[in-house]
Image (cartoon, helix red, strand yellow):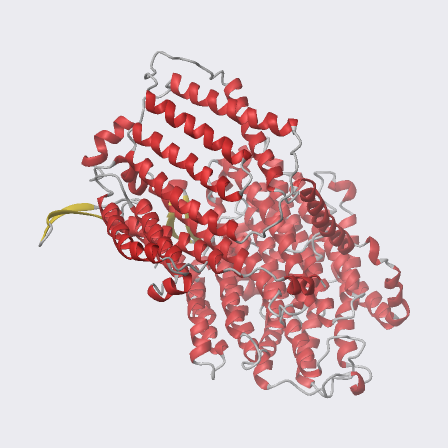
């Protein structure tokens, strides 16, 4: 089956959403949408047996064969894992959204169209083997994320957040495109699979380091790594189902996917390892540290997501170490890759449930401000339990899935101290220390999130709505995810064999030839070792610091807002906005005469420059026809009427003289035997004179004011220059023929191939039909322009109002 | 621009039809002799402009209740569809097809898909020029 088309199934379904919303508005549109991810999940789950054995599937669809662009769906362990996450979490999120978004008040058709568009884009990213189509889907996720963040578009913060995320992720996407182009130049292919075997040769290429940095820029902006993470907290303005889906479980993991997917290409380079592991780990610490500053439930979760993404990123970076050592199975370097994928699954599960709980709290109490919340434990017992499971898993407590992957994370970070390449022997010791610090803060904010919301004193007077437990439908998804968190703890090796190991094989194909070779057994208890003592230390220090949180949390306010990254972004936006404005005001005078001077000067510059540089000037009179009486007469009329335009005192005379110029040119066409041109010119002239008269009729009648026009030397120079340039170009074009004239070709083929007799017209509709197509498109646009200028312009009164 | 010139109006009543017929002729003749969709469209426009000059916009609108914006859109779609139709037959974009047919009344006639494209051009040209003239003319 050509499953490449399944990528487009959500997009196809999106076409019917507005119709379903309009016609079957009584049923919540979400129920129809739900079918799509569920069906896809079931289908993709049926592919699992193939990847568990290390196999892969390819399905191809040629899109633009002439440019070598194709949709290639490549399913291996890594892409199938992501595919299942996208469709699985997608189904749960859609189910949750049915109860979260009211069918009477919300614009569900917009919401679900964007969501389905996103689903296609995301499936496309993780399945594409072709770099260009991958980029295409990548930008589509940015756009759908923009639309979803701005879903409540009447809110100021929503629009701001949407724009911010768009600016940052699209910037990264463009950088990444550059990286892809460099990769394809080096490897002479767009296919990732074909690039990987070439990695050893590419590393010495001049472009290699550029491609690496550019691709990482794309991954870091998308996965909210330091310093690009600032868009993610602002993206929390989106409806909570979107935050749970895009901004924690799937889209922000696209960067991780890209890093994982391209690890085999870049792994040889030490820069790769340093950048990915270093930036990732720093982000992990930074995110967890500032999560405690947040007062908004979703804000805490946003920073926690930033931190967790950094954690996974650093593990992916650390997994590069495995490439540089012999016999990886006997070292501790083997854990990083496994831990990365394992934690990715865990994070998707527990963070999804936490976001849904944050949404429930918001929905049932009317606020997300943690200072107003508290004591909800007895009112919302189910939500509390789910939140506790999710948060404890995040903090790394047993018996939850997060504990296992957190332990492996510490193992992987500790292993870096033993790595002796790329100056790791000196700096490697920093990794476990920063990881430990980050984990301590992770522990604290997890507790902060749960207990400041659900424990403590209930403050009903501060809540906009009296709090109560959420409806059962809204609880299904988070409860299901919370169950998964616990289940994963007890069957980690089944998850490992089915999902993690096949994915690890895709990240480290040079180490393993089948998933069975990934020799890792996850167990909750592995004796008294450094990791365990580190974990105990985290619990002890974290617990102590959480106990005293109220005393030191205020010190966060000492970080000034004016030197933050957000301020930098705001200033950059403001500067580019006002700077661009000021720059265009420099030359946009509002006078058409100024613009004509710019345009004509440029024409002179470029034409004369080309003539000079190409030494193309030639003057040859041997081939000229004699100048006859008629030509002279028309020429005199032409020049005479041109001068009349310049010196006439009334508009009417000027318009008629302008018409005369046009008619004289038409006469030239007649005597040079170009009936088509003459015909068109005549009609055009007639109509444009009529148009001119119409337009001038509406101009205000200003009383005559005699004023001698000042002689402007610059303008005269430009005018003279244009005349001379055109004369020179015409003479040169006539005097030399670099190529034989194309008219012979037209004469031969006009009847035999195009089935016509009039070359001019056949050129218009056939030979150069594209020109005509675009020309009429431009005509249409001009028509729209005129309508907007005349019909939709503001009257003076409205104009003043608009400026307020 | 309200005019009440009997001579102009009487002449217009006849001349408009002559121009219109000529426009149709020019349009169809285009493939073998001078003419085509562009000129045909312009001639049609000039006929309507003449009507507007002789009578006034309101009258002309009553005689010809055409939405020129829609006309433009239809023309653009038609042109694009003609160009794109070739994809269905698995030949490159914009490949035209033609053949000769024996039609009643016309005898041996060549039918060319370029004609459809030219109809598109014709509609766009008439649509846009009339849109411009009408919007400017109606503006107070």
Say which residue appears at 40% left-offset and 13% top-offset.
A620
Say which residue appears at 49% left-offset and 15% top-offset.
A615
Drawn side of residue A2 relative to residue A426, left or right:
left
Quadrant of the frame with the N terminus of chain A:
bottom left
Q: Residue A722 location in percent, x, y?
A: 53, 27
Give residue A390's quadrant in the image.
Answer: bottom right
**Would residue A404 be visible to someone looking at this image?**
no
Q: Residue A656 location in percent, x, y?
A: 45, 41
In the image, A118 versus A534, the foreground residue is A118
In the image, A464 versus A780, the foreground residue is A780
Which residue ends up furthest to the front in the rendered image?
A: B6
Say which residue appears at 86% left-offset and 57% top-offset.
A560
Give residue A789's quadrant in the image.
Answer: bottom right
Which residue ends up furthest to the top in the rendered image?
A: A622
In this rendering, the count of numbered labels is 0
In the image, A389 versus A510, the foreground residue is A389
Q: Residue B95 location in percent, x, y?
A: 27, 44
Q: Residue A479 location in percent, x, y?
A: 60, 79
Drawn side of residue A422 relative to residue A606, left or right:
right
**Would residue A92 be visible to someone looking at this image?**
yes
Quadrant of the frame with the C terminus of chain A:
bottom right
Drawn side of residue A17 relative to residue A576, left or right:
left
Drawn side of residue A657 relative to residue A240, left or right:
left
In the image, A439 versus A110, the foreground residue is A110
């Amino acid at each position: 089956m050509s499953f490449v088309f399944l990528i487009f199934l959500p997009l196809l379904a999106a076409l019917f959403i507005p119709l379903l919303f309009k016609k079957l508005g009584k049923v919540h549109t979400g129920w129809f949408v739900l079918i799509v991810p569920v069906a896809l999940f079931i289908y993709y789950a049926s592919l699992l047996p193939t990847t568990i054995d290390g196999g892969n599937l390819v399905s191809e669809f040629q899109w633009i064969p002439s440019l070598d662009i194709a949709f290639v769906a490549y399913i291996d362990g890594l892409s199938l894992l992501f595919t299942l996450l996208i469709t699985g979490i997608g189904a749960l999120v859609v189910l949750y959204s049915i109860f979260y978004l009211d069918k009477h008040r919300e614009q569900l058709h917009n919401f679900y169209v964007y969501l389905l568009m996103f689903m296609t884009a995301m499936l496309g990213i993780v399945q594409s083997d072709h770099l260009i189509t991958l980029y295409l889907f990548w930008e589509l996720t940015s756009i759908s994320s923009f639309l979803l963040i701005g879903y409540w578009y009447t809110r100021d913060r929503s629009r701001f957040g949407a724009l911010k995320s768009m600016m940052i992720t699209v910037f990264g996407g463009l950088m990444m495109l550059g990286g892809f182009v460099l990769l394809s130049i080096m490897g002479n292919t767009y296919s990732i699979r074909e690039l990987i075997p070439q990695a050893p040769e590419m590393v010495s290429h001049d472009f290699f380091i550029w491609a690496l940095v550019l691709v990482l820029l794309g991954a870091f902006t998308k996965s909210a790594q330091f310093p690009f993470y600032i868009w993610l907290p602002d993206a929390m303005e989106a409806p909570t189902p979107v935050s749970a889906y895009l901004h924690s479980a799937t889209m922000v993991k696209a960067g991780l996917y890209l890093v994982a997917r391209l690890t085999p290409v870049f792994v040889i380079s030490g820069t790769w390892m340093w950048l990915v592991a270093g930036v990732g780990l720093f982000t992990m610490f930074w995110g967890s540290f500032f999560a405690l500053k947040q007062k908004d439930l979703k804000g805490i979760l946003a920073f926690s997501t930033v931190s967790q993404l950094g954690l996974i990123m650093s593990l992916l970076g650390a997994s590069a170490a495995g490439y540089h050592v012999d016999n990886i199975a006997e070292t501790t370097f083997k854990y990083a890759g496994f831990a990365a994928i394992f934690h990715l699954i865990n994070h998707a599960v527990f963070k999804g449930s936490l976001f849904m709980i944050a949404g429930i709290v918001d929905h049932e109490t009317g606020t997300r401000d943690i200072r107003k919340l508290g004591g909800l434990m007895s009112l919302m017992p189910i939500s509390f339990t789910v939140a506790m499971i999710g948060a404890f898993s995040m903090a790394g407590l047993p018996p939850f899935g997060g504990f296992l992957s957190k332990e492996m994370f510490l193992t992987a970070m500790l292993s870096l101290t033993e790595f002796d390449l790329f100056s790791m022997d000196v700096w490697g010791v920093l990794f476990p220390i920063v990881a430990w610090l980050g984990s301590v803060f992770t522990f604290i904010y997890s507790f902060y999130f749960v207990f400041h919301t659900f424990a403590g004193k209930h403050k009903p007077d501060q809540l906009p709505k009296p709090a109560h437990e959420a409806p059962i439908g809204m609880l299904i998804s988070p409860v299901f995810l919370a169950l998964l968190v616990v289940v994963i703890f007890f069957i980690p090796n089944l998850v490992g064999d089915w999902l993690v190991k096949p994915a690890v094989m895709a990240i480290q194909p040079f180490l393993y030839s089948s998933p069975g070779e990934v020799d890792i057994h996850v167990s909750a208890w592995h004796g008294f070792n450094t990791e365990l003592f580190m974990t105990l230390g985290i619990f002890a220090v974290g617990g102590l610091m959480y106990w005293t949180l109220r005393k030191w949390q205020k010190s966060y306010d000492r970080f000034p807002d004016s030197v933050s990254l957000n301020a930098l972004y705001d200033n950059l936006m403001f500067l580019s906005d006002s700077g661009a404005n000021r720059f265009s005001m420099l030359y946009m005078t509002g006078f058409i005469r100024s613009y004509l001077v710019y345009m004509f000067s440029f024409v002179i510059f470029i034409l004369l420059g080309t003539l000079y540089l190409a030494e193309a000037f030639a003057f040859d009179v041997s081939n000229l026809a004699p100048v006859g009486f008629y030509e002279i007469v028309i020429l005199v009329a032409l020049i005479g009427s041109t001068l009349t335009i310049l010196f006439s005192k009334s508009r009417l005379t000027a318009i008629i003289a302008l018409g005369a110029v046009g008619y004289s040119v038409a006469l030239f066409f007649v005597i040079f035997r170009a009936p088509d041109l003459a015909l068109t010119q005549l009609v055009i002239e007639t109509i444009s004179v009529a148009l001119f008269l119409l337009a001038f009729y509406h101009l205000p009648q200003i009383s005559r004011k005699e004023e001698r026009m000042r002689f402007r030397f610059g303008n005269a120079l430009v005018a003279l220059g244009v005349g001379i340039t055109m004369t020179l170009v015409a003479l040169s074009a006539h005097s030399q023929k670099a190529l034989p004239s194309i008219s012979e070709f037209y004469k031969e083929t006009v009847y035999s191939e195009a089935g016509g007799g009039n070359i001019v017209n056949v050129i218009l509709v056939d030979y150069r039909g594209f020109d005509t197509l675009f020309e009429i498109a431009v005509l249409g646009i001009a028509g729209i322009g005129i309508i907007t200028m005349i019909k939709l312009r503001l009257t003076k009164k409205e104009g003043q109002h608009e400026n307020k | 621009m309200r005019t009440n010139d009997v001579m102009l109006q009487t002449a217009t009543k006849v001349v408009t039809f002559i121009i219109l017929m000529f426009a149709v002729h020019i349009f169809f003749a285009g493939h073998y002799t001078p003419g085509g969709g562009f000129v045909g469209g312009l001639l049609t426009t000039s006929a309507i402009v003449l009507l507007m000059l002789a009578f006034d916009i309101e009258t002309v609108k009553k005689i010809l209740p055409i939405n020129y914006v829609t006309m433009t859109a239809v023309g653009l779609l038609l042109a694009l569809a003609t160009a794109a139709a070739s994809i269905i037959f698995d030949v490159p974009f914009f490949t035209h097809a033609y053949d000769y047919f024996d039609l009643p009344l016309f005898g041996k006639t060549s039918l060319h898909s370029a004609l459809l494209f030219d109809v598109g051009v014709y509609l766009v040209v008439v649509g846009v020029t009339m849109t411009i003239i009408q919007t400017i003319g109606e503006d107070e």
